[in-house]
Image: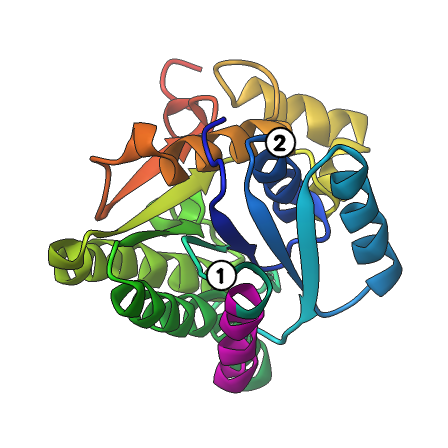
Amino acid sequence: MLLEGKSVVVTGGNSGIGEAIALAAAREGAKVVIDYVAHPDETKSLIEKIESSGGQAVSVRADVSKVEDLKNMVKTAVDAFGRLDVLVNNAGIETRTSVLDTTEADYDKVLAINLKSAFFGTQLAAKQFIEQGDGGTVVNISSVHEDWPMPGNTAYCVSKGGERMLARTAGVELGPHSIRVVNVCPGAVDTPINDETLEDPEKSKTLKNSIPLRRVAQPSQIAETVVFLASDRGSYITATSVVVDGGIMQGSVGL
């Protein structure tokens, strides 16, 4: 198994892509810490699902925009499993507002949950990795919009652009400690955040026609990429972004 015995923390781990990552990591032998801020019943059900399949998982309620909560999240992994090997910075939100309409509160919330959390999560995980002495991996769930503009969702794009440089710069800084930092950049994924589009026949058709593979991703497909990158098979990949988008960033070419 690709993650046998590894201790893995997944932020926002009880729904959508985060849930898929938690399940995939557990299937590959990881001991999983599921961070959440809402829906404790869903978190409990997810842990039961992992345990019923022979895996190990615990939960921690941590607001990733708060450094003290992030510290507690790392501590939970160490207390439960003796160490931390992989941090997946998955938690994220968007407001779908333009640069003209975004309020200060909107901006602060998006940047705190999407970028501040990834920055300080990386910092705290790296300190734990260094203390352990044998390296570790941070995987940030970024977006194609770290590089591809999305008018009408400016704060989100700014946060993802920041994650792009976080992976590059932190990956270079931390490489000598055998710590890897890499982004995964999904395109359109079948998660609740896209329900409005996918449930509208015309919008769904337009979206799928913009994707060369003519389909949106399933969360499990993003999760499998994360598992690969977190495993020894991805051990020479760092300070970069891996795009998993069905070609959508190039999809307008020739259409």
Residue depicted at 75% across the width and 26% down the height: 202
Q: Give the range drawn in magenta.
A: 65-78
Q: Does the magenta stretch include residue 77?
A: yes
Observer able to see residue 98: no
Which residue is label 2 attached to?
Answer: 27
Residue lying farthest right? 41
Residue depicted at 31% across the width and 63% down the height: 129
Observer able to see residue 39: yes
First-in-chain label (2 vs 1):
2
Which residue is label 1 attached to?
Answer: 156
State the image coordinates of residue 216 (x, y, percent, origin top left): 61, 25
Between 80 and 66, the one lying in front of the other is 80
Amino acid under disc 2: Arg
Q: Is residue 76 above or below residue 225?
A: below
What type of secondary structure mainly makes up the magenta span? helix
Q: Is residue 155 above or below residue 13?
A: below
Foreground: disc 2 or disc 1: 2
State the image coordinates of residue 146 (x, y, percent, origin top left): 37, 50
Residue depicted at 48% across the width and 15% down the height: 212
Between 1 and 105, the one lying in front of the other is 1
State the image coordinates of residue 27 (x, y, percent, origin top left): 62, 31
The local secondary structure at tag 2 comes to helix
Are the residues flagged by discs 2 and 1 in contact, CB closer than 8 Å?
no
